Image: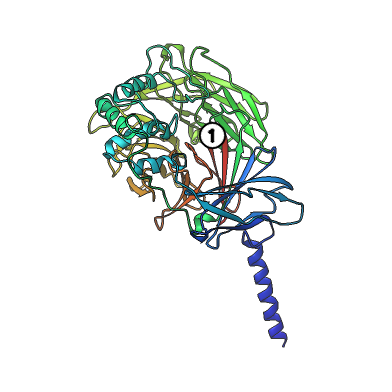
Amino acid sequence: MPTRLNALRAAIAAACLLVAATPGLAQSALSGKVTSDREGAMEGVLVSARKAGSPITVTVVTDAKGEYAFPADRLDPGHYQLAIRATGYALPGADAAEVAAGKPATADLKLKPAPVTSDQLTVSEWLTSAPGPEELKRGLLNCTDCHSVQRIFESRHTSEEFMQVFERMGTYYPGASDQHPQKLVGNHRRPAVNPAMAQSFAAYLSAINLSAKEVHGFEFKTAARVTGRATRVIITEYDLPRKEIQPHDVIVDHDGVVWFSHFSEQFLSKLDPKTGKVTDYPLPVLKPDHPKGTLDLEADADGNIWVGMMYQGGMARFDRKTEQFRVYPLPAAWQTDATQQSHFSVAGMKADGKVWVKNSDRSQVLKLDPVSGEYVNLGSYKIPSSGRPIGIYGIYADSQNNAYILEFGNGGIGKIDGKTGAFAFYPTPTPFSRARRGRVDAQDRLWFAEFGSNGVAVFDPKTEKITEWKKPLEWESPYDAVADKNGEVWEVNESSDRIGRLDPKTGTWINYPLPRYSNLRRVFVDDRGPRPVVWSGNDHAASVIKLEPLD
């Protein structure tokens, strides 16, 4: 009898632990079931809740039973507006819920079929749906930095008018937007389209847009809703106080404070993840007549926050204790209207005290001494086999402060020895991979996004080999990739409204869905807790995203 009683007690205790550890089974603030007449219980539907007057939206995803649950610690008492994301469905009627303290609320949602409309398509779905050769479709990826491709597909421009659009687009700052359309200065231009393909690209765009018809002549192909582990996630969005804010990079410092850079304004900002409050720190303006905005954002080993000042021509270091900036302008004699400090690396500073900096003007590589403020210009690099100049995108340092440069024009990585200056170049196995952003992991391996070949890759300096993994959906076009402390790799992009999680050992991807159109360019993993917490800035929606996997 005692043995049976002990076994029963153990079984009850195990069941209690399972309930406590399983989201949706533990006490929730709000839960329910999502169904439709067409499918019955619906898996993979995103359910979002936003409290009246709050800048914070919390989203969960329905499981295989169609059930969803917001944990009790995620929704304070109050009135919440509910929304769903499920292509081809709408939420009629009851779209609100009252959450009371200590009293779980229930909201079952009955969805109705609705036409798939163009505003529901992701960028990757537009490109998958549209007819035409891949080399012309690929040109549309260059448009997504400033706006969604929906604008292009629903435009009425003729081929001749598109040629004028291409010329005009080349005059804008890379952080230009509808809210803040900044122009470049002088004769500096950023060609929006390769001149060699401009005519054929213009003809292609006028054939697939609405210039000669009222409806698109092709079927909309949408990705299937997520299932399984991709539904086990909580997504928190923080809407920022001004629509013109473009949070390009988001990072979390050693103390858990969230920081973000502004792609179109001269600020560094701090976000309180509990309240959503934003504190702006104005950056000095070095060149008033040039575009304003910053890009890369990094914390050094001492906790200082560094930011690349783009067309203002320099770097800035922010002391969190004094809340003061020290600015490092480039020498005036080096500067042109094309001078741009977008990317840099402070990751290896402990090795020799130097900061690697990229000057987009002529793809130059610089080294900064933060003590003296002096720069050394190492010049531009070429691919040894062809002599062709390397079009650098990101630049990243390992623990010994050797630098990796990512070749965006075609594909490959260069390695600069921090002590000797020796240079080596490694082409990617897939041609035209267009290596974009990445990070060096604890084993000094470089992980990076392959924008042009729809994958992520790693370079192992021990074997000097590059290994690649393709994303599960077409045309996701990864922008950035980083490994977490467990060896899994996280990826973000401008195209699929999903955040990818790769297990390199098995090659398995989990593609977590996002509740709205998302233009993501930097992935940051906060590894301080038992599970990784992923942060990114939605550059086109003035919001910061926190993604928490539940397993």
* Residue 256 falls left or right of residue 480: right
Q: Say few, some or many: other residues with alpha carbon within 10 Å of mark 1 (under 14 / 14 to 19 / 20 or more).
A: some
* Residue 508 falls left or right of residue 385: right
State which quadrant residue 267 falls in: top right
Q: Residue at x 48, y 15 (%)?
A: 290
Residue 179 in percent (x, y) is at 53, 24
Secondary structure of the residue carrying tag 1 is loop
Is 30 situated above or below 296? below
The front one of 471 and 316 is 471
The front one of 412 and 302 is 412
State which quadrant residue 361 falls in: top left
Q: Name the residue under label 1.
A: 541
Residue 528 in percent (x, y) is at 60, 47
Residue 297 in percent (x, y) is at 53, 32
Please name the amino acid that badge 1 sits on.
Ala
User: The C terminus appears in which quarter of the rendering?
Assistant: bottom right
Is 208 situated above or below 179? below
User: The N terminus appears in which quarter of the rendering?
Assistant: bottom right
Residue 283 in percent (x, y) is at 59, 21
The front one of 151 and 7 is 151
* Residue 430 falls left or right of residue 113: left
